[in-house]
Image (cartoon, grey):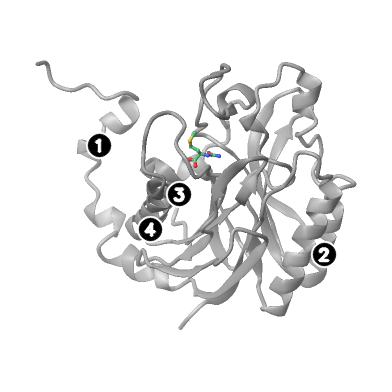
């Protein structure tokens, strides 16, 4: 028996600082139309998909920052995306900056089902970068300034015939992200990202950016026997190169589909969700093989404590 579902990774090319949301939504609907032609049931868009990646700028005017945030979802500008997806019978993952009614700001993703209903929300837990202006960098990465740490944990949802979870960008580098969802039986992890093609914190060969992207996606998939669909905002955005490389990883850890450009591009793959079963029932049968009596440090401490010299 197989549970086949076609999933689309809908990569976006650069979004200019001045590009209106309505224009970005039109680009996303064009990708949804292609996804419909490819018989996709689910499409994944990037992190902070509606605007340029604004944490690259230090801003002191809160109104200027808040212009990048969504106060409602859907809004007048994003409703056409929901309507197009529902018309096509396609569910989707969407990343955006969320400003709550009580004034809290999160880097958020939602899971929308194939009828246009929001069935899940995730708020990014592992915020990278820094909170203060660091003028020595060629650009900033101020997620720690503009967002609070997510307060929803890593839930999963049984929807559209699968157990799905979400995370966002830097979360993928942390094995705990995948394991907490793995412990809830996740079969399909959806994630969007914005990854600059250069490390501005210290020297690192640029090729490592894509290597590390693949490394953590493939490890997360394999070690938890889950599909992973990872989707970038790519290309040169406001002078900053973003790695792209959006891909679909099967539970064996192998990349089975990958984009070939750093622009707007849809790549689709027929995913057999039952491929997640083998690993879950054998080598990564958690109930049989995990040894939690030896894992206490994972939740008891954050930093490393090497033995005394
Ligand atoms: N958006 C995001 O989380 N980007 C980070 C950049 C890390 S360098 C500050 C990432 O993990 O790709």
Crowdedness near tag 1: few (<14), some (14–19) or many (≥20) residues, C-alpha within 10 Å:
few
Separation of disc 4 and disc 2 at Cα?
32 Å
Mark 4 to mark 1 CA distance (whole Å)? 23 Å
Task: Report which residue position mark 4 lands on.
Answer: 218
Mark 3 nearby-residue class (10 Å; few <14, some 14–19, many ≥20) = many
C-alpha gap between disc 4 and disc 3: 15 Å
Q: Which residue is mark 2?
A: 84
Q: Between 12 and 169, which is closer to the camera in this rendering?
A: 12
Q: Is mark 4 within 8 Å of ligand 1?
A: no
Disc 1 versus disc 3: distance between alpha carbons?
A: 17 Å
Q: Nearer the viewer, residue 246 or 224?
A: 246
Q: Quadrant of residue 142?
A: top right
Residue in the image at 32% along x and 65% along y: 279
Mark 4 or mark 1: which comes first in sequence? 4
Marked residue nearer the N-terminal end (4 or 2): 2
Q: Report if the CB atoms under discs 3 and 2 are less than 8 Å apart.
A: no
Give the residue at x 78% y 52%: 24
Q: Earlier in the sequence, mark 1 or mark 3?
A: 3
| Disc 1: which residue | 295
SS at circle 2:
helix
Q: Using the image as rendered, state which of residue 291 and residue 101 is in the foreground.
A: 101
Quote the CA–CA distance across marks 3 and 2.
30 Å
């Amino acid at each position: 028996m197989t549970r086949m579902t076609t999933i689309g990774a809908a990569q976006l090319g650069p979004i200019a600082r001045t590009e209106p949301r309505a224009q970005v939504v039109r680009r996303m609907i064009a990708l949804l139309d292609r996804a419909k032609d490819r018989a996709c049931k689910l499409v994944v868009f990037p992190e902070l998909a509606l605007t340029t990646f604004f944490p690259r700028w230090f801003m002191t005017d809160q109104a200027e920052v808040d212009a990048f945030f969504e106060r409602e979802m859907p809004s007048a500008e994003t409703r056409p995306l929901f309507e197009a997806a529902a018309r096509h019978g396609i569910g989707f993952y969407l990343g955006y900056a969320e400003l709550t009614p009580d004034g809290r700001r999160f880097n958020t993703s939602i899971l929308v089902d194939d009828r246009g209903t929001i069935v899940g929300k995730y708020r990014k837990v592992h915020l990278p970068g820094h909170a203060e202006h660091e003028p020595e960098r060629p650009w900033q990465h101020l997620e720690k300034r503009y967002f609070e740490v997510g307060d929803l944990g890593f839930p999963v949802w049984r929807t559209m015939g699968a157990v799905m979870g979400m995370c966002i960008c830097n979360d993928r580098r942390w094995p705990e992200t995948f394991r907490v969802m793995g412990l809830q039986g996740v079969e399909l992890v959806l994630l969007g990202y914005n990854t600059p093609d250069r490390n501005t914190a210290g020297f690192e060969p640029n090729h490592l950016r894509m290597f590390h992207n693949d490394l953590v996606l493939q490890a997360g998939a394999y070690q938890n026997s889950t599909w992973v669909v990872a989707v970038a905002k790519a290309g040169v955005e406001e002078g900053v190169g973003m790695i792209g490389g959006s891909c679909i990883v099967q539970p064996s850890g192998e990349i089975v589909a990958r984009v070939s450009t750093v622009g707007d591009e849809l790549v689709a793959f027929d995913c057999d969700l039952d491929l997640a079963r083998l690993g879950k029932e054998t080598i990564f049968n958690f109930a049989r093989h995990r040894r939690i009596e030896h894992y206490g440090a994972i939740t008891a401490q954050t930093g490393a404590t090497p033995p005394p010299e």
